[in-house]
Image (cartoon, rainbow, N blue to C red):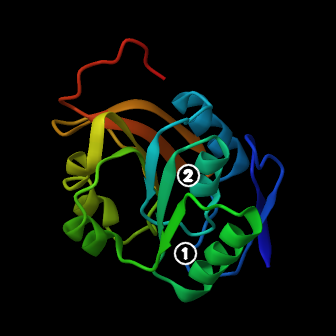
Amino acid sequence: MNQVRLNAGVWRSRVLKFPDADGLRPTPDRVRQTLFNWLGQELTGLSCLDLFAGTGALGFEALSRNASQVTMLELAKAPLQALLQNQKLLQASKADIRQADALKFLAQNSQRYDVIFCDPPYHKQWLDKLLPLLPGHLSAQGWLYVEAEYALKSDSDWQVVKSGKAGQVYYHLLQPADTPAPATQP
């Protein structure tokens, strides 16, 4: 089994184990630290959606930082089983783990989230399909975090607020282009 360590919060330094699986890439430590610096470290009261949970590092990190609830989607069986084992290990009662396809979930779900994590498998054009749907699932002033194999640019639909690159991973914090600027930006 592979492992990833949580960075901060109530489960700081706890280790999550996960299997080898095709396309499964845990978000690197440094990138997770940067993301949660952008989001403000504490996610108290925020609801989150992790569209491609994989190792669960982003979702469990959000819960460790007091998110009120995190829905984690994973379609592949082996990673799903590891997510459920890690949920039990951490006693993460606020994790809603589902075996689900991201597009089907979004078509059937009307809940809005404060933070959506989107780290889809590379080279499968997931972002082309997902980005048009996601504004309808974000709360007012909500944030979309995206990892991709290429850099995203602001356009008529999305504003790239922050971005970076680590190795071959481009990571971005976005808001819908029509979102009014908050009093303080991450």
Q: Earlier in the sequence, mark 1 or mark 2?
A: 1
The residue lying toward the viewer, choosing from 68 and 49, is: 68
Q: Residue at x 31, y 35 (%)?
A: 175
Position of 111 with respect to 136 (left or right) is: right
Q: Name the image quarter holding the N terminus.
A: bottom right
Instruction: Residue 183: give x, y in percent of width and height.
Output: 37, 12
The answer to whether any part of residue 146 appears in the image is no
The residue lying toward the viewer, choosing from 160 and 91, is: 91
Residue 23: mark in rendering: 1
Instruction: Residue 56: give x, y in percent of width and height.
Output: 61, 63
The picture quadrant where one finds residue 33 is top right
Instruction: Residue 96: give x, y in percent of width and height.
Output: 49, 66
Q: Residue at x 60, y 79 (%)?
A: 79
The answer to whether any part of residue 140 appears in the image is yes
Position of 53 with respect to 106 (left or right) is: right
Mark 1 residue element: loop
Mark 2 residue element: strand
Residue 105 vertical placement versus 94 (above, below)? below
Label 1 amino acid?
A: Gly
- Residue projecting furthest to the bottom: 77
Q: Residues within 10 Å of mark 2 (few under 14, many from 20)?
A: some
The residue lying toward the viewer, choosing from 174 and 151, is: 174
Q: CA distance from mark 1 to mark 2?
A: 13 Å
Instruction: Residue 182: give x, y in percent of width and height.
Output: 34, 18
Q: Residues within 10 Å of mark 1 (few under 14, many from 20)?
A: few
Q: Residue at x 36, y 43 (%)?
A: 152
Label 2 amino acid?
A: Val
Residue 153 vertical placement versus 123 (above, below)? above
The picture quadrant where one finds residue 49 is bottom left
- The residue identified by callout 2 is 169
Q: Residue at x 78, y 73 (%)?
A: 2
